[in-house]
Amino acid sequence: MKTLVINTEKELKTFVNENRKNITNINGVEFGELYPMMEVSNKHATYYDVETQGNKFLYCPFNVTTK
């Protein structure tokens, strides 16, 4: 497993587009290949939280762990 720090939403968007299936954790939130669903733009990063049944924000810097 590799861990890297991404400093902006725009950089995270590019990384997610290329590596979504390999992401296992972002800022302590566990991710599978497809779930939870993420939406990343140049200014915001959110994921769908099943417990609250709503979207939650991810804030930079992003500590991303991959397979």
Image (spheres, helix red, strand yellow):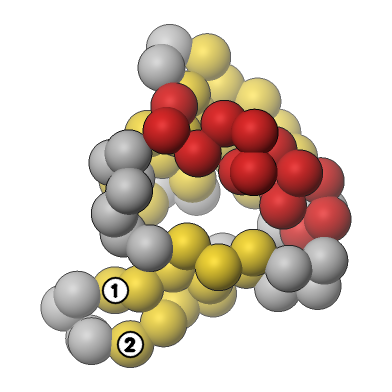
Taking 11 as reference, is 53 above or below it? below
Circle 1 SS class: strand
* Residue 52 % position (x, y): 22, 86
- 1 or 2: tag closer to the N-terminus: 1
Q: Which disc is residue 35 wearing?
A: none
- The residue beneath circle 2 is 54
Res. 48 visible in picture: yes
x and y percentages locating residue 55 in the rendered image: 41, 82
Residue displayed at 47% across by 62% down: 38
The answer to whether 57 appears left or right of 40 in the picture is left
Quick one: label 2, few (<14), some, or many (20+) residues within 10 Å? few
Quadrant where the N terminus is found in the figure: top left
Q: Quadrant of residue 49?
A: bottom left
Q: Neighbour class for label 1 at 10 Å: few (<14), some, many (≥20)?
A: some
* Amino acid carrying mark 2 in the image: Gly
Tell me, yes or no, whether the two marked residues, 1 and 2, touch with CB atoms within 8 Å: yes
**At x 50% / y 39%, what residue is drawn?**
20
Give the total number of marks visible in the rendering: 2
Q: Is residue 36 above or below residue 18?
A: below
Q: Is residue 20 left or right of residue 34?
A: right
Residue carrying label 1: 49
Residue farthest along the top direction in this orientation = 1
Between the C-alphas of marks 1 and 2, the distance is 6 Å
Quarter of the view holding residue 33? top left
Q: Is residue 39 depicted above or below 9 in this figure?
A: below
Which SS class for mark 2?
strand
Residue 67 lies left or right of residue 61; in this view the side is left
Image-quadrant location for residue 57? bottom right
Q: Amino acid at mark 1?
A: Asp
Vertical arrangement, residue 5 with respect to residue 40, above or below: above
